[in-house]
Image (cartoon, grey):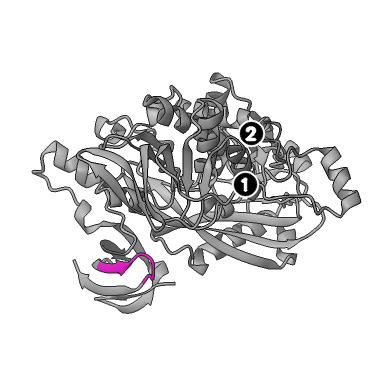
Amino acid sequence: MLLIPCPHCGPRNQEEFAYERTLDSVVRLNDAPELAIATLYARANPRGQEHEIWSHTCGQWLRLTRDRISHAIHSVEPL
Amino acid sequence: MGAGRYNALALLRGAITGHRHWGRAWRAAEPRGPYDVIIIGGGGHGLSTAYYLAKVHGIRRVAVVEKGYIGGGNTGRNTTIVRSNYRQAPLQSLFEYSLKLWHGLSDELNYNVMFSPRGALFLGHSDADMARLAERGDAMIANGLDADLIGRDEVARLVPLLDMSPDARWPIEGGLIQRRGGTARHDAVAWGFARAADSLGVDIIENCEVTGFLREGNRVTGVRTTRGDIAAGRTGICVAGNSGHVAGLAGIKLPIESHTLQAWVTEPVKPMIDTVVMSQTLHCYFSQSDKGGMVGGGDPDFFPSYAQRGAPIRLEDSIAQSIALAPALSRLRMVRSWAGVTDMSFDGSPIIDELPLDGLYLNGGWCYGGFKATPGSGSVYAHLLATGQSHPLAAPFYLNRFADGRTIDEVGSGPMPQSR
């Protein structure tokens, strides 16, 4: 189980959070179609550290740097 | 081949000689390239690909390289359910092709894979559920598959284990059953394909992890491994769960994320259910293994992970729902739970295609549906690796379908990793 430190609420149970997407997969409004498609679908999916966007039930969005093998959370920042 | 062909006579001979004549079922091969084809990943899909390459296409200079032991990944971690009851035609055709291969597989391989077509039942808990199941059943029948929409009484007769009382936690209105679906012995599938492929000359190289690719310009000419470089004409990735990682070694990003899926098993008991019960509404499914353990699972953990371990909350969900459906399960002790890493593609369907580098191919993105596809997946992937052309059944599952807007999206939920 993950204990995720919400910048607004402090450490909370994983069950209150939702993984949204990776930080590099947010499509910008003025992106060219090729870039938008690559952003939407292509994932590095590393066996290691990745930057992710999560949301908390309190309404806070989070930028999480997390290890996908050890599940260690290296940093959490409000987004 | 130490023991030759498996048959009743060999068994009888063993009864007299104390079963000391059984040899290894496949050789412990050393790398000895160059090969015509190298398959990365010694799971069910990789081994069946190697078998069909040798058997159907006559390509026998084939190696399967596996980082651990064969069948030690998702082949040994699934809940062994085999079915083809999908709603969309490309998925129906691919999984039905596989289901037909399952029905003759033990004879084909001379190895008992314990395929048991005991019926795969989707439960319906509401009018809306029944309408959805009827639509799925109609779609299946229109494509020549068998599907029976059954009422509440028929469900009660088929599965007496279910709580059909007026105060049951979940009402059961009926179900959709595919009677030719069922279960198989997952380890035996890997072992059977390994033995059959080995007897046709395929080298199965265990404890051999791929660490990179050999390249000549835009062409992949083999693999770098922990046991040295191995050259190959064509290289096929078949490592579902780790597709993102292995493709990443070639600098390729895929429309795949790796997520965790858990399963559980109880102590073995006498037969209490002879059907596979699944509820897509309650997100749980269970069946009884031939050893007697009740095997089940439910939702994924909903975030990317390669950890092969899951969170107790998801396990609790699937067990709670299973017990609500079949209260007798609450009397059993759970002996084990585990997790596998699933290749979640962004439309819920597999990807079987050549990658942007020449000579490098991918078979992955099976989400949670890989085990049932084992023979069919190997057969169509072998076709691709042998001819360089997609098998007609695999053609819809090409890599660029996401850019083309031709996703095969069974759930219709858009570009996110999908479960069903």
Q: How many marks?
A: 2
Which residue occupies 27% across, 66% down?
A59
Looking at marks 2 and 1 on the same chain, the residue that comes earlier in the sequence is marked by: 1
**Does the image show residue B123?**
no
Image quarter for residue B245?
A: bottom left
Chain part drawn in magenta = A64-71
Return the mark for residue B245: none
Residue under the image location 71 percent in, 50 percent down: B23
- Residue B123, horizontal then vertical, whole percent: 62, 42
Q: Work out whether residue B261 or residue B227 is closer to the camera in this orientation and state it.
A: B227
Q: Nearer the viewer, mark 2 or mark 1?
A: 1
Q: Label 2 marks which chain's residue?
A: B
Local packing at callout 2 (Cα closer than 10 Å; few below 14, some 14-19, many 20+) is many
Of B215 and B352, nearer the camera is B215
**Same chain, labels 2 and 1:** yes
Instruction: Residue A65: say if magenta.
Output: yes
Q: Residue furthest bottom?
A: A10
Q: Amino acid at mark 1?
A: Trp
Q: Quadrant of residue A62?
A: bottom left
Task: Tell me the SS state at disc 1.
Answer: loop
| Amino acid type of the residue tagged 2 in the rendering | Trp
- The residue under label 1 is B26
Horizontal arrangement in the rendering, residue A44 relative to residue B232 (left or right): left
Seen in the picture, residue A30 relative to B293 is either above or below; the reply is: above
A76 and A15: which is toward the camera: A76
Circle on res. B102: 2
Residue B169 location (% of width, % of height):
64, 56
Q: CA–CA distance between discs 2 and 1?
A: 22 Å
Q: Pick whichever, B75 or B414, lies toward us.
A: B75
Q: Is B235 contained in the magenta span? A: no
